[in-house]
Amino acid sequence: MLELLDISAGYGDTPVLREVALWVPPRSVVALLGTNGAGKTTLLRVASGLLTPTTGELRLDGHDLTGKPPHVLARAGVCHVPEGRGVFPNLTVRDNILIQAAGTPVDEAIEKAVSAFPILGRKLRQPAGSLSGGQQQMLAVARAYVTDPAYVLLDEVSMGLAPVVVDEIFEFLGRLATSGCALLLVEQYVTRALELADYVYLMNRGRIDFAGEPGELDGARLMEQYLGARA
Ligand SMILES: Nc1ncnc2c1ncn2[C@@H]1O[C@H](COP(=O)(O)OP(=O)(O)OP(=O)(O)O)[C@@H](O)[C@H]1O
């Protein structure tokens, strides 16, 4: 279980998260939805060790990992796919995969990434920066997958992509979830996120104001609160 307990965090003197609690059970999909600037990215940064909370605890499988650096969280099985495509544009697709896959045999890592998104197999020698936006996002998601993480944190992976590419990425996320990997999904496509999710949290101005199963959500309230969010 990945647990964020009473987390407060911010940047400098500016508080962003206020006593936030969120749980990601193993093998579950959790959607974290909210208005712009609510603090969703900040919470993912806390969950992957990129940002140390001012108060509260980050626990993984019962161990307190608060304040531990990202590589410790990564080694423990938490993988973060950041907003805005975390790929190295000047490196080849192959090298992008291998950098992430330290410890995994080369052929196995490449095969795994290509099994996630076959198009990557035809681009292995190209610089990642020469790929389309959608292919770069596929690479970012595939890089996370090759490390065999128990928890994957995904920040707006569909941002700015054509619907057909969003379909392909969501189809893969569905397979990833079925394979037993837990997902924490920050997503602007509310309906798609809810289709996958076992649990949903709604965040507003640094606080969680709903936590439950998607079926418990009041659709009208959701739309009112997230007017402008995409279906
Ligand atoms: N590096 C930073 N330094 C200072 N303030 C920041 C920084 N990053 C984010 N913020 C502020 O923290 C607040 C929460 O931002 P955050 O990106 O976590 O929200 P979000 O819910 O992910 O929003 P969005 O959907 O717009 O990405 C915002 O007011 C934002 O301006």
Image (spheres, rainbow, N blue to C red):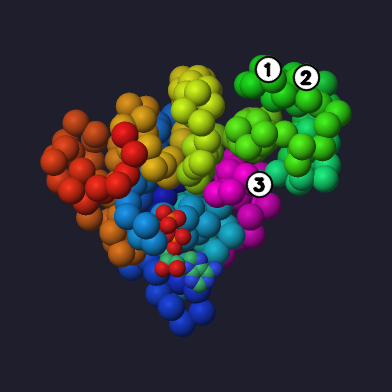
* Residue 96 in magenta stretch: no
Which amino acid, by three-letter code, is at mark 1? Pro
Q: Is residue 5 above or below residue 95?
A: below
Q: Badge 1 local density, few (<14 within 10 Å), some, or many (20+)?
A: few
Quarter of the image with the N terminus in it = top left
SS type, badge 3: loop
* Residue 51 placement: quadrant: bottom right
Q: Is residue 150 above or below residue 53?
A: above
SS type, badge 2: helix
In this rendering, the label closer to the viewer, 2 or 3:
2
Q: Earlier in the sequence, mark 3 or mark 1?
A: 3
Which amino acid, by three-letter code, is at mark 2? Arg
* Residue 28 placement: quadrant: top left
Q: Which residue is mark 3?
A: 86
Q: Which residue is mark 2?
A: 122
Q: Report, in whole angstroms, how far the alpha carbon at label 3 lies from the one at label 1.
A: 19 Å
Quarter of the image with the C terminus in it = top left
Q: Is residue 201 above or below residue 163?
A: below
Figure disc tally: 3
Q: Which residue is mark 1?
A: 118
Q: Residue furthest bottom?
A: 13
Q: Earlier in the sequence, mark 2 or mark 3?
A: 3
Q: Which residues are magenta?
A: 67-85
At horizontal 76% and vertical 46% (from top left) the residue drawn is 88
Task: Give the side of residue 136 with respect to residue 7, left or right.
Answer: right
SS type, badge 1: helix
Q: Are marks 2 and 1 in contact (CB under 8 Å)?
A: yes
Residue 226: x %, y % from top left? 26, 48
Residue 228: x %, y % from top left? 30, 47
Q: Are marks 2 and 3 in contact (CB under 8 Å)?
A: no
Q: Report, in whole angstroms, how far the alpha carbon at label 2 lies from the one at label 1.
A: 8 Å
Residue 12: x %, y % from top left? 51, 79
